[in-house]
Image (tube, rainbow, N blue to C red):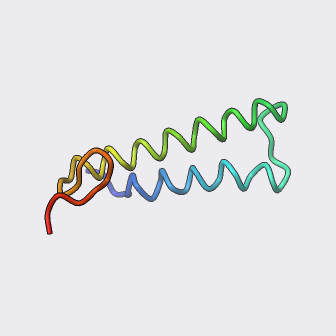
Amino acid sequence: MKTYSTEYTAILVNILSFVLPQIGVSVGSDALTTTIQTVVAIATGLFLLVKRHKRGGVNALGVRTEV
C-alpha cells in the first residue's frame, strides 16, 4: 500500500534540484549540476504528463477531451 503521493514527490524532487545548488549543495562541477537539473526537470515533467494522461480526460498534449 502506497502512503505517499508520487506527484508531490516528483514536484519536490524537481524543486530541490534547483534549490539545493543555490544553498551550496553541489554534486560536482557546474556542468554536471546543470545536466542533472535538466534531466530531473524533463523526467519530472514527463512523469506528471503521463500520469495525468493515464487518469483520462486529457490527450497526450494535456488538452481536455471531456467537458
Q: Residue furthest bottom?
A: 67
Query: Measuring 39% from the left and 49% from the top, which residue is drawn there?
Result: 48
Q: Is residue 66 above or below residue 62?
A: below
Return the x and y of residue 2 as percentages of the image width and height: 30, 52
Q: Is residue 46 above or below residue 35?
A: below
Q: Is residue 32 above or below residue 14?
A: above
- Left or right: 35, with 60 as reference point: right
- Left or right: 44, with 36 as reference point: left
Q: Nearer the viewer, residue 25 or 36?
A: 36
Query: Measuring 83% from the left and 35% from the top, which residue is drawn there?
Result: 30
Return the x and y of residue 50 as percentages of the image width and height: 32, 44
Return the x and y of residue 54 as percentages of the image width and height: 22, 47
- Left or right: 60, with 42 as reference point: left
Q: Nearer the viewer, residue 38 or 10?
A: 38
Total numbered circles: 0
Return the x and y of residue 32 as percentages of the image width and height: 76, 30
Q: Quadrant of the C terminus?
A: bottom left
Q: Residue furthest left?
A: 66
Query: Measuring 59% from the left and 35% from the top, which residue is drawn there?
Result: 39
